[in-house]
Image (tube, helix red, strand yellow):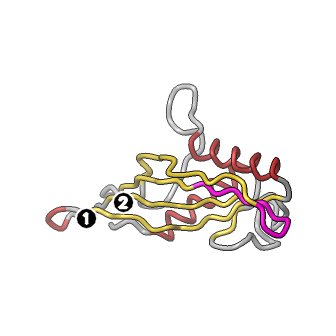
Amino acid sequence: MTVQGRVLSLAVQAALSGATGRSCGYGAAPATADKPTGNTVPYTVLYPQGGTASGPPFGESEGDGRIVYQVTSIGTTAEQVEWMADKVRIAVFGKLPKGGYATPIVAAGHTVIGRELDKEDGAAVANGVYSYLTRIILHVTTPDS
C-alpha cells in the first residue's frame, strides 16, 4: 500500500491530543466539541506539509514516505505558547527509559520508523495571539500485511 496522508495525519493529531492533554485541530483551530479541551487556549493545529514517497520495486505492495508536518502551538502569552511547544516536542520526541518513543503514532497500515525535528520558528505574536511553529518529519513505511 502507498502512504496515505490522511490516515497518518489523523494518527499524528490523535497522538498530539493524547500526549499533550490539549486539543489539536487538523488544518484549523479545534472546534468547541473537540476533545479533550475544545478550542480553549492553549491548543495546537496540525498542518500537513506534504512529503516524498519512494515506490516499491516490481509492483510490491509496500511503500515508504518522508512526511512533513507543521505543528502550530497557540496561546495568549509567550510563556504559555512556549510551554505548549515544549509539550509538543516531548510528545513527538520523548523516549522511554529502555528505548523507543513514549508516544506511539498508530496509523492503520503504516509504521512510523523515524522522527526528526526539521525546524522551529519560535514564538511570534499577532493581534494578541501568540504562536510557535514546530516542523517535524516522520519517516513511514507500509509493510505488507
Residue at image coords 30%, 57%: 144
Is-magenta flag for residue 128? yes
Question: Residue lying farthest top?
Answer: 98
Residue at image coords 43%, 46%: 114
Kindly identify which residue carries mark 2: 65
Magenta region, residue range = 125-134
Is-magenta flag for residue 139? no
Looking at the rendered structure, the kind of residue marked 1 is Gly
Looking at the rendered structure, the kind of residue marked 2 is Gly
Residue at image coords 69%, 49%: 85
Kindly identify which residue carries mark 1: 55
In front: 71, or 9?
A: 71
Q: Quadrant of residue 34?
A: bottom right
Instruction: Residue 88: give x, y in percent of width and height.
Output: 66, 49
Numbered marks: total: 2
Left or right placement of residue 133 versus residue 137 in this view: right
Instruction: Residue 124: give x, y in percent of width and height.
Output: 73, 59
Residue at image coords 83%, 61%: 41
Question: What main secondary structure does the magenta stretch of the protein show?
Answer: strand
In front: 45, or 113?
A: 45
Q: Quadrant of the N terminus?
A: bottom left
Q: Give the mark nearer the N terminus: 1 vs 2.
A: 1
